[in-house]
Image: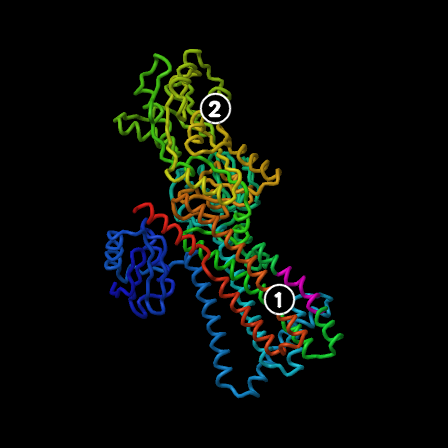
Amino acid sequence: MKYQVMHDTESRLRIRAGQWAFTKKEGYGLASLLLNQDFIYEVYTSHKNGSITIYYDQNNKNKEKILTILNKITQDDLTEAEPTQTQISKEITDDFYLKLSKMIVRRLLGRWFLPMPIKNALTIYRALKYIWGGLDSLTSFRIDVALLDGAAVTGALLQKQFKPASSMMFLLSISDALEDYTVQKAKSTLKDSLALNIDTVWIIDENGEEKQVSAMDIKKKDKIKVHMGDIIPVDGKVIDGEGMVNEASMTGEPLAVHKTIGKTVHAGTVMEEGNIIVEVYSMNKETRLNKIIDLIENSEDLKAQTQSKAEKLADSIVPYSFLATALTYLITRNPSKALSVLMVDFSCAIKLTTPLSIISAMREASDNRMMVKGGKFLEAYANADTIVFDKTGTLTNATPKVVEVIPMSKRYERDEILRIAACIEEHFAHSIATAIVKQAEEEGLKHEEDHSEVEYIVAHGIVTEYGGKRAVIGSKHFLFDDEKVKVTKTQEKKIIQKAAKHSVVYLAIDGKLEGIICIDDPVRPEAKQVINELKNLGVENIIMLTGDSESGAKASAEALGITQYQSQVLPEDKSRIVEQLKTEGKTVIMVGDGINDSPALAIADVSVSMKHSSDIAREVADISLLSDDLYDLITLRKLSVGMLDKINTNYKNIVAVNGSLLVLGVMGVIPPSTSSIIHNLSTMLFGVMSTKSVLNNDSIEVEAIEVADTS
């Protein structure tokens, strides 16, 4: 590909290949091609001038890799594709700014070049929409913002105050455009959170063999194999197997549902346990999930709670505006003074600044690599007084390491215990299983398939047959309570002595404890500071939940300075604990990353998933962190609190300024035209202030601290 570098910074590269270099859909294909690289996290293309903007992890070698890829791209590589969520979001934003620019240019050109009679005629023409809206509210016996707007515009026209009427309608049109934009953004984000991103599926052919095919090639009556942890790609009926399916994305219920032969499953739900074969009923646009997405497209109930409150507040002020106008006229008998009161529309500024503040905060979250699925989740995050952490993968890096392997009898040596454990655990991508397999590989302990098919029991362990005997590996609760494995006094003493500070995996064969594997998963270096900072920011309760042993959980809690924690917690226990906290009147943030966290994520007031979370955790979470940094939780708190502070400050300023205008208008100090001009200018000023970055001051403070630390 021939191109020219237009802009080059440490983490952003913009090149231009020229007009006609690629079509719009080929641009999406180019973006997909580049996003396959781990170090590239955002790509935007424009087919109009052939530009490609690439955001990547800061590294000179990464830039060289990008340029190498671009140099190798040929015409044959330009395949069409569908846009990603970030591309759709950017296009919605670009369209909004284009629409806004056109509105401003039209207004300026009209004011400068059109003769007065034509300007007045256009003002009357544009006023018809607001007058009609006011009449509709009046005939429906609604005292709302539409009625006030219609009355104010009508009053101004009757008084031949064309400029104030035109300015007021201009601001109202901007407010409407902002509202449309926030709804479109909310729809887009919510649709993306529900949409399936599945490229391939496992299909059972006529010979009963399992093979991987493209998801686009699925037909009705095909038989699809769904493995544990997979997102179900179709609507269909279970014809073989059984398992637990999390339907939170479909029903909102956090607890998994048991599915057996004959039961129906839906696209977008997730297999938490077991494996099933599904006969396809419907796929793609015909699925129940896509019908829900279609409903979302036509839904208007997507505004942030704060925005809805602002609109209700605006409506609640309307009767007082009419009352003040009527009293002013009755007392003064001066239509001009009454109109001065009517033209000061509190609702206009409130409706304009609130969505602007929310949009600004969501954009700033996106700039800091955090995906927020709606303004109401930022509000909940700001108001939360309790945060519940899953330990593994959240407070730790989910890279546990085997520190000791201890035989518990004379039947098996130390290396044999590790070899057997690795042989069984290699079938599962759990972090502890990975640690055991990795340790065996490092020690050169080769193992063959000496066991039968394994059964994984979520948050408990694994059951299989090894050498013709029942073998179980997992938690203490699983082996000793569920499997009734016997432990001798000597073994119990050894466990207490050797495993006091570690998480422990237990291995039993033929009902007898044969070995324990001690594992450490060090906490993230920044975790303690993040927890302290969250406390300083008003999060009163910090709670850690983990399926680890009491000794491992206690060691982690002490290292982090957490006083509230629970060990050996099952998935259903996590959701129960979160529900209990909510019933106590607490507003709860749940932070997690695994399949077993999904019930608690679904039930929390606001949930956050980490960068390397499971598919289901990302699906259920309200906010997704796109960088692997716990400090993002602090950034998010400052951003969300700052958003609410900004909205509340706007309310106070709007009341102060417009209240002053009311008093001056009633006293006859200023005429309606002056009142309208000041009102409109102040509204625009508040709008501009609403777009101001919340985090700028914080980032300056952080930089100052870093400079002080390094000096």
Q: Where is residue 151 in the image (x, y as percent from the top left)?
A: 67, 74
Say whether residue 620 is visible.
Answer: no
Q: Position of residue 212 (x, y in %)?
A: 38, 43
- Residue 478 is tagged as 2
- Mark 1 is surrounded, within 10 Å at the Cα level, by few (under 14), some (14 to 19) or many (20 or more) other residues, namely many
Q: Give the range drawn in magenta.
A: 311-322
Prevailing secondary structure of the magenta residues? helix
Depth-wise, is mark 2 or mark 1 nearer the camera? 1
- Specify the quadrant of the image occupied by residue 148: bottom right
Q: Which residue is drawn at 30% across and 66% down?
A: 16
- Specify the quadrant of the image occupied by residue 392: top left
Indicate the colouring scheme: rainbow
**Front-most of residues 50 and 396:** 396
- Residue 205 is tagged as none
Say whether residue 582 is visible.
Answer: yes
- Specify the quadrant of the image occupied by residue 2: bottom left
**In the image, is residue 238 above or below residue 184?**
above
Q: At label 1, which amino acid type do we have?
A: Phe
Q: Is mark 2 on a helix, strand or loop?
A: helix
**In the image, is residue 23 above or below residue 235?**
below
The CA distance from mark 2 to mark 1 is 63 Å
Q: In the rendered image, which residue does mark 1 sit on?
A: 346
Counting residues from the start of the chain, the first of labels 2 and 1 encountered is 1
Q: At label 2, which amino acid type do we have?
A: Phe
Q: Position of residue 324 (x, y in %)?
A: 71, 69
**In the image, is residue 476 above or below residue 109?**
above
Q: What element carries label 1?
A: helix
